[in-house]
């Protein structure tokens, strides 16, 4: 949606911009039928999608494939929410099990990069068949040879597969596989919830994530930026609406969290927008709080204040220690709302007061600098 600035500094909306009709290249029909034949013989299929589903506006088609064929699905962090993460076929805490034991992998709208271990063993079974769907032919087979490589737009190809699968793929065939993943998921989820209820001080980042998760509206827009808090947020906070999860992606783009949040609030002024920041990543663009105040954008920014860059766990690099900056006081000086929290039971009330303030807000939460997302037993959900 386009917008313009008016004389009093407020944002005013123009009419929505309607792009020209998009050409959506379909996949080779023969390869589509081969994919359906493969699914009809599979016993343990898994579907992996990424941000290409968002770019192709293919969330509806992806859901249709999941529902009609009964295939468990996973997304990359950038593609979270294209299917609600409380869907019956989203076994989020059994991610590693699903990848490791799948006999057919369908990858659509995502690169086979480090985020999913390049689809290589040991993260994925060496003998699993790979169906790769991508608009860019150069991506087909880049990091793992594809048994079936379909070049085409995700929305168009998913429609083709659903249409071709009618009566040929019996979802009941996967019942044992789904029961297995469900059992693993329940056990891991119980471990996760227990870890997130910790009352330790300094506050564990997982407890912070729990409080944020329980506070958010179902259709909230969540932005996560940092390192440790980025990984913990991926593990612990689900997304239910396509396009409502933004994160910094590879760590080299740190600092985009608050700017992303402000852009999201301008685009969807009626949506709840919360930015979950590491203290280091927040510092890169902290003065965007001034932008938020000037343009009356009531975004809530929650900072995991662990006092430094946890990418240096040995604490031996120059500049590693950042100190425990009172970013809440900085927010107040800029005309925003600010709170400083040191006890886990204080997080939720602070979030509620920040929301009630009706202005840009910072909730500055002191977290345990020793916490490492990679040491969590159920960290298979983090990538």
Image (cartoon, rainbow, N blue to C red):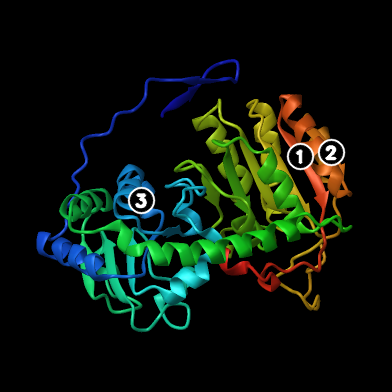
- Checking the image for residue 21, the label placed there is none
Give SS at disc 3.
helix
In whole angstroms, how far apart are the C-alphas of marks 2 and 3?
A: 38 Å
Quarter of the picture containing the N terminus is top left
- Residue 43 locus on image (x, y percent): 32, 70
Q: Earlier in the sequence, mark 2 or mark 3?
A: 3
Query: In the rendered image, which residue does mark 1 sit on?
Result: 362
Q: Which residue is at a point 81% across and 75% down the rendered structure image?
A: 315
Q: Which residue is at a point 51% across and 57% down the rendered structure image?
A: 77
Give SS at disc 2.
strand
In the image as oriented, which residue stretches furthest toward the top?
8
Q: Earlier in the sequence, mark 3 or mark 1?
A: 3
Give SS at disc 1.
strand
Instruction: Give the side of residue 314 with respect to residue 74, left or right.
Output: right
Q: Determine whether label 2 and label 1 are within 8 Å by CB.
A: yes
In whole angstroms, how far apart are the C-alphas of marks 3 and 1?
A: 32 Å
- Residue 226 locus on image (x, y percent): 65, 58
- Checking the image for residue 53, the label placed there is 3
Q: Residues within 10 Å of mark 2 (few under 14, many from 20)?
A: many
Q: Is residue 258 above or below residue 1?
A: below
The answer to which of 310 and 129 lies nearer the viewer is 129
Q: Is residue 282 visible?
A: no
Q: Residues within 10 Å of mark 3 (few under 14, many from 20)?
A: many
Instruction: Give the side of residue 266 with respect to residue 293, left or right.
Output: left
């Amino acid at each position: 949606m386009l917008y313009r600035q008016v004389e009093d500094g407020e944002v005013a909306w123009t009419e929505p911009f309607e792009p020209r009709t998009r050409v959506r290249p379909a996949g080779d029909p023969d390869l589509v039928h081969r994919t359906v034949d493969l699914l009809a013989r599979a016993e343990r299929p898994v579907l992996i999608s990424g941000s290409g589903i968002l770019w192709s506006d293919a969330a509806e088609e992806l859901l249709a494939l999941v529902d009609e064929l009964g295939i468990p699905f996973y997304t990359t962090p950038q593609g979270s929410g294209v299917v609600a993460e409380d869907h019956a076929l989203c076994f989020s805490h059994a991610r590693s099990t699903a990848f490791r034991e799948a006999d057919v992998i369908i990858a659509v709208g995502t690169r086979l990069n480090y985020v999913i271990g390049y689809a290589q063993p040991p993260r994925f079974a060496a003998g699993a068949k790979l169906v790769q769907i991508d608009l860019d032919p150069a991506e087909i087979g880049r990091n793992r040879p594809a048994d079936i490589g379909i070049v085409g737009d995700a929305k168009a190809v998913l429609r083709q597969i659903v249409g071709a699968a009618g009566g040929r793929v019996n979802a009941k065939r996967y019942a044992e596989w789904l029961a297995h993943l469900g059992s693993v998921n329940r056990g891991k989820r119980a471990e996760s919830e227990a870890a997130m209820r910790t009352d330790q001080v300094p506050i564990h980042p997982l407890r912070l994530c729990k409080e944020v998760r329980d506070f958010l509206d179902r259709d909230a827009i969540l932005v996560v930026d940092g390192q440790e808090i980025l990984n913990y947020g991926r593990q612990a906070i689900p997304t239910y609406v396509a396009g409502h999860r933004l994160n910094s992606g590879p760590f080299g783009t740190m600092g985009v969290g608050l700017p992303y949040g402000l852009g999201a609030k301008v685009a969807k002024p009626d949506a709840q927008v919360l930015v979950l920041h590491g203290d280091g990543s927040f510092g890169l663009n902290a003065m965007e709080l001034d932008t938020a105040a000037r343009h009356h954008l009531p975004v809530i920014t929650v900072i995991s204040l662990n006092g430094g860059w946890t990418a240096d766990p040995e604490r031996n690099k120059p500049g590693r220690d950042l100190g425990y900056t009172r970013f809440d006081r900085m927010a107040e000086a800029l005309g925003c709302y600010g709170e400083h929290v040191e006890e886990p039971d204080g997080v939720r009330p602070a979030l509620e007061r920040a929301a009630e303030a009706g202005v840009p807000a910072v909730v500055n939460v002191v977290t345990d600098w020793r916490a490492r997302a990679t040491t969590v037993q159920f960290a298979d959900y983090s990538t």
